[in-house]
Amino acid sequence: MTNMFNQVQKRSARLALAALLLSTALGQAHVGEHPSVHDTVAGIIDRFRKTISLKELTAMDASKAKSLLTEKELHILATEHITFRVNVPVKVIIIRETAMGDKPFWLKDRGFIPMGFKITLQGTEVDFWMKDFEVGRIGLGVNSLTGGNSHYIAALMPLKKETKLEVTELYPGQLRVGSLKDGLQPFVDRPEAMPKLPVLPGVLSGLAVIRTQNESRDDAKLINLFHNTNHPALAKPDQIMLTWSGDPKTTQSIQWRTGPSITKGEVQWVKKSDYNRFQPAQPKQTKATTFKMENANLLNDPIVHRHTVTITGLDPGTAYIYSVGDGSDDGWSELAEFTTAPGRTEPFSFMYMGDAQNGLERWGSLVQSAYRQRPDVAFCIMAGDLVDRGNERDDWDSFFHSSRGVYDHRPVVPAIGNHENQGGHPGMYLQMFDLPKNGPEGIEPERAYTFRYSNAEFFVLDTNLTMESQAVWLEKALAASTATWKFAVYHHPAYSSKPERDNPSIRKHWTPLFDKYHLDMALQGHDHAYLRTYPIKDQKKVANTAEGTVYIVSVSGTKYYEQDPREYTEFGMTNTSTFQVLDIQISGNRLVYRSYDTEGKLRDNLIIEK
Ligand SMILES: [Fe+2]
């Protein structure tokens, strides 16, 4: 029988092969959620691919792309992106970024006319376009054929003042009706509210607004679609990643990738204490579940196979050596290792990072040096926005390439950011990460979950969904927790660096639970500046950590935001990528929190004692 130890000698040859397979790439792809627009765009892209040369495709601009669409396709893209019914005649007012120029393409074609004034919202100039509609169904079109910009929103003004407007059958279902006044959240997928709107002409203020999904601004992107990945799959496994989907004491999940020629996978493992290179113990093995992941927009590597294994029945607190492969002699990965969680309360350390998202190469050197500096961490938490384009595989290929040698040794514990949710659904993320399925009923499994490690419990939440959808479950899980230390992990921060980036819904539905059950720390992302709050309870600064929760925002990638002084900020930094290490010490019941920059220099620290 072939086993994982056969591969030890073949290491250098494989590295040389991997180095040969690098190439350059650029671009973006469409990911949509409206069936009609989605299918139409998929059909267009398929036709483009079959009938247009790669050179022409790469050079194509929006007007050329539009000229290649059929009447029917144009009609669907102009009318079926957002639909709803009104009970009275209305003026529909499209509010969009002035910088969009002649986009959306259907605005003028369908007779919308400019209202002749502009305002500035959060630093962006927007203008207003109007058209009257009768009672009944109204359909609005896609944001653009090029992608980018923010999504428009639509205000609705009854033509007769005294009538009461009702909006029904709003499609897609995740859209919501809001009100054009202070506190408006324009986008359903970005919970940031506009605390103060500029002064609006009287007739506009208080109008009903269709709050749109900003991530769907790229739903009909028809240019710059086709690109190459820098890291195509090989027959040999790569992108090997540890996660937990079961109990960290006794299980270990492993995921990896191969080219499409490899149709099966398995993992072999032995206890590290039984591993002897010259007289190896017979390894145990578990078969993988294999599935095909297809990305038609990746010209050089459209199809890969992904393999997932969960090993069960492991001993707690035990190190194991493992290798993944397809069972053939040449198919084994380098030996790597994992360690199960301790069976009783023991000191441990873990890492936490904010958004990687941009500059994944430079993020790679951060995560590599973080792991070199603290190889003793048990796992790595990432609070969302692991990549920029979450439904495009080449971005994930860069992510895995940058973190190679780390996440095959230490499990990654991810939360879903808005960028994983590209196009309105984190499809690729959910396919790739095998995570606990113990989250709230009524939302997709693996989007929110909890797990226990030693005397700490982690509550991982999804801020792309409504906070309400997770609140009941969160309260139950917090109430049931017997852990000494409690941490929440989620993407959009409850407390941010700037007022317009605050998330009142999190403060409404979650932070009262953090107060009630005394959460120690909330580990957040999204707001690309470093922030540590004073201990907070009831949305107010309190005297010490025994009374309140400390909220952290951090960024590990290379995109940064500005920071305003906030009354709750104990320590803040801008233009600094960091990683955090949290040491849970049993003697003295202490938590030592430290934040390091890319040079490994200590930038912030905090000690919490129980
Ligand atoms: Fe984000």
Image (tube, grey):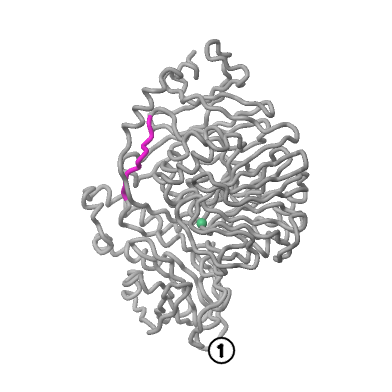
Would you place residue 347 above or below residue 439 in this image?
above
Q: Is 75 or 108 nearer to us in this picture?
A: 108
- Sort mark 1 into few (<14), some (14-19) or many (20+) by Cα contacts within 10 Å: few
Would you place residue 572 above or below residue 607 in this image?
below
Label 1 within 8 A of ligand 1 by Cβ: no
Q: In x, y percent, where is residue 341?
A: 67, 33
Q: Quadrant of residue 128?
A: bottom left
Q: In x, y percent, where is residue 525?
A: 56, 55
Q: In x, y percent, where is residue 550?
A: 68, 56
Q: Is 317 or 586 nearer to us in this picture?
A: 586
Q: Secondary structure at mark 1?
A: loop
- Using the rendered image of the protein, determine whether residue 88 is visible from the camera's viewpoint: yes
Q: Quadrant of residue 549?
A: bottom right
Would you place residue 1 above or below residue 382 in this image?
above
On whether residue 229 falls in the magenta region, the answer is: yes
On whether residue 503 falls in the magenta region, the answer is: no
- Using the rendered image of the protein, determine whether residue 158 is visible from the camera's viewpoint: no
The three-letter amino acid code for the residue at tag 1 is Glu
Counting every numbered tag in the picture gives 1
- Extreme residue in the top direction: 279
What residue sits 67% from the left and 37% below the top?
348
What residue sits 23% from the left and 49% below the top?
51
Secondary structure mainly formed by the magenta segment:
loop
Q: Is 293 or 551 nearer to us in this picture?
A: 551
Q: Which residues are magenta?
A: 226-234
Q: Quadrant of residue 470?
A: bottom right
Q: In x, y percent, where is residue 579?
A: 55, 47
Identify the residue position indicated by label 1 in the image: 162
- Extreme residue in the front direction: 601
